[in-house]
Amino acid sequence: MKLKATTYRTLSGTKEIIELPKKHSAQWVIYEDNKPKYFVDCFKLEIESNAIMNNLVLCNKEPIEDVLEKINKRNNINLSIPKISRIGFKKKLKSVFTNLDLQPIPEKWLAYSL
């Protein structure tokens, strides 16, 4: 999958964030332990974990951050969506395109009854 690695300068230092080149509203790069590991596309329903995430996020009208927090607590893992800056100050330094093989979130971590 072709992704964009963007380096930002913030008050806390420089950060590299992996982003989608053309992000849509229901697509996210999910980090595990501060490294990009999973990709969620809530409209690509032929993948079972994306269908479950569609139900958890879009049907239940919950923010992705809340759903990830529940998954983290239930499975004792550390999934997150990276934030560039907590206070909003950021300066884009550079962007490069990279290919990463990001998998869907494992189905065993997801349940309709989160």
Image: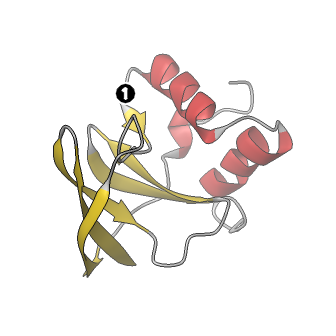
In this rendering, the answer to whether 88 lies above or below 28 is above
Q: From the viewer's perspective, is residue 1 above or below residue 28?
A: below
Residue at screen point 40% across, 35% down: 87
Q: Residue extending furthest left?
A: 13
Left or right of 3? Residue 64 is: right
Residue under the point 37% across and 75% down: 3
Q: Of residues 98 and 72, which is closer to you in this image?
A: 98
User: What residue appears at the point 56 percent right and 70 percent down from the top-left corner?
Assistant: 23
Q: Tell me which amino acid carries mark 1.
A: Ile
Residue nearest the observer in this picture, 20 or 87: 87
Query: Which of the 4 image quadrants contains residue 4?
Result: bottom left
Dot 1 alpha-carbon crowd within 10 angstroms: few under 14, some 14 to 19, many 20 or more: some
Label 1 sits on a secondary structure element that is loop
Q: Position of residue 24 (x, y in %)?
A: 64, 69
Residue 37 placed where, x, y %? Answer: 34, 53
Q: Is residue 12 left or right of residue 88?
A: left
Q: Write down the residue under mark 1.
A: 77
- What is the quadrant of residue 55 in the picture? top right
Q: Quadrant where the C terminus lies?
A: top right
Q: Nearer the viewer, residue 40 or 105?
A: 40
Number of numbered discs on residues: 1
Q: Quadrant of the N terminus?
A: bottom left
Outermost residue, right direction? 59
Q: Residue 11: x percent and y percent?
A: 22, 40
Q: Is residue 1 visible?
A: no
Residue at figure coordinates x 54%, y 78% from the top left: 22
Res. 89 in view: yes
